[in-house]
Image (spheres, rainbow, N blue to C red):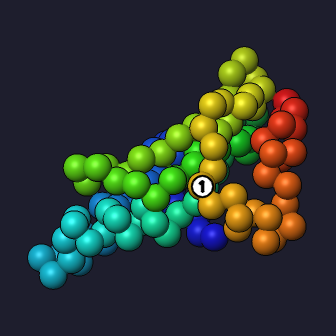
Amino acid sequence: MCTIHANSAREAVTKMCTLPLLAGENVSARFVVPTVASSIDLVVHAALERDGRRTVREIAAVPGRAEEDVVEIGALFVRRGGSLVRADGFPPHAERFAQAGFDLAALLAQDTS
């Protein structure tokens, strides 16, 4: 687990790919992008609301694929009308959730509002 400051789940993944490139020419996007794509399962984007509360704005899955230096992500939950609602993405590595004792289908079916 880690935290990173970003304005969306996609921007967080982009930052994780971009920041290592600041190390110089010895680190390339050909190495960093696939490494980031294969190292992250989920991104939870939380934001500070006007009333001072932090809320989850979106939860995205990172299936481990990248194309043309862009990491693929899929929306699992998005905020609509003040509620977090299920989108159509599905997290990768279901076996990891099962090994940790989580019923992935039940988690994805939960009402999050």
- Vertical placement of 44 versus 37: above or below? above
* Quadrant that contains the N terminus: bottom right
- Residue 13 in the image, given as x and y percentages of width and height: 44, 54
- Vertical placement of 69 versus 56: above or below? below
* Quadrant that contains the C terminus: top right
Query: Which residue sits at x=72%, y=18%?
Result: 81
- Vertical placement of 75 versus 92: above or below? above
- Residue 15 in the image, given as x and y percentages of width and height: 38, 57
Q: Which residue is more in the foreground, 2 or 33? A: 33
Query: Which residue sits at x=63%, y=50%?
Result: 91
Residue extending farthest to the top is: 81
Q: Amino acid at mark 1?
A: Pro
- Vertical placement of 112 versus 93: above or below? above
Q: Which residue is more in the foreground, 103 or 29? A: 103
**Seen in the image, is 72 located left or right of residue 77?**
left
Query: Which residue sits at x=49%, y=69%?
Result: 39
- Residue 95 in the image, given as x and y percentages of width and height: 71, 64
Residue 105 in sight = yes
Q: Which residue is mark 1?
A: 92
**Seen in the image, is 106 located left or right of residue 67?**
right
Residue extending farthest to the bottom is: 26
Q: Dot 1 lies on which element?
A: loop
